[in-house]
Amino acid sequence: MIKLAIDGMGGDYAPKEIVEGSILALKTFDDIELTIFGDESKMKPFLIEHPRLKVVHTPKYFDMGVKDIGRHTLREDKDTSMLMAINHVKEGLSDGLVSAGPTQALIFASFFMIRPMKEMSRVAIAPMIPSVAGKPTILLDAGGNIDAKPEHLVDFAVFSTIVLKEVYGVKDPKVGLINIGTEKGKGREIDKQTFNLLEAHPEINFYGNLEPKEILTSEAQVIVSDGFTANIVMKTMEGTAKALGQILKREIKSSFWAKLAAVLFLKKPLKNFKKSMSADEVGGALISGLDKVVVKAHGSSNAYAFMNAIRQAKTMVSQDVIGKVKKVLGNKDE
């Protein structure tokens, strides 16, 4: 049985969507046990009795706007829902954690409480992003390290390669490096050094440099850069997808015939388009490099999205992805 800790109060729509998503996960997957940490009085309207569900009460939780937390926060606010859930994993009482709470707080607390695996010196945010071909694709680092070194990016690439192989069944995922041109020797010094390391790594199927305009259409399924660059790419894609949806909606509403065509002929394609661009289908971003499984669900997660974040975490645990990453990275100096 896979045991997961849930931050019941993290997220824009907590605790309702978090609790309902957790219950949906329990009904969908029969191999998980969940422990939800949060204000029981606020969660009660959405809770049900379930043999694989435990609730640990705490009235304290982080506001979604919190950003800068320090080590003193880990001591003074150790009874918040997020830190209690993280500690549950740290103590070995849960195999992994899912939270839709504030990103910086989750990364900082996980780094100092769960700790990074000794084979990796940095952690990274690794969200799944859409692709035209509908293939699972990971972008990283999406904001964790703006000062990463080439060897850090290589470790991130190895981590994500193993995730795609073990969790998503991708046979030999290609790794692309975000750059201003496709030719070898392009970009900053970090890009040039990272290119050489990726090209030479035995565990990586290197695609080469990847221009941002190709991210949604290329064959690469692991897309790597430093936290500053990849975060800009991610937010640009999110904004573009949202704008395209708004333009499409505007054009459909522009005339009677457009509305009629949408209803009669385009209902299914439009539904598929929305689904392919939806973050709800993915669930969340992996926090790569930690010694335990931590999934950062989207702050705006609804119940369905949070259920998918739980699915993501339980699959990571069941496939022992962390152990497999350690084995690969542990052999790199031998």
Image (cartoon, rainbow, N blue to C red):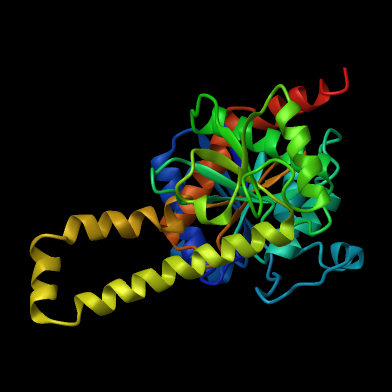
Viewer-side residue, 89 vs 320:
320
For image coordinates 80% across by 46% down, the residue present is: 114
Quadrant containing the N terminus is: top right
For image coordinates 64% across by 28% down, the residue present is: 320
Q: Is residue 305 above or below residue 330?
A: below
Residue 276 in the image: x percent, y percent? 37, 53
Residue 3 in the image: x percent, y percent? 61, 38
Viewer-side residue, 315 vs 78:
315
Q: Is residue 135 above or below residue 165?
A: below
Q: Is residue 265 left or right of residue 299?
A: left
Viewer-side residue, 130 vs 53:
130
Please say whether residue 18 is visible from this viewpoint.
yes
Tag count:
0
For image coordinates 55% across by 66% down, the residue present is: 236
Residue 333 in the image: x percent, y percent? 88, 22
Q: Is residue 246 left or right of residue 87?
A: left
Q: Is residue 173 above or below residue 68?
A: above
Please say whether residue 92 is visible from this viewpoint.
no
Quadrant containing the C terminus is: top right
Residue 245 in the image: x percent, y percent? 35, 70
Extreme residue toward the right, this view: 72
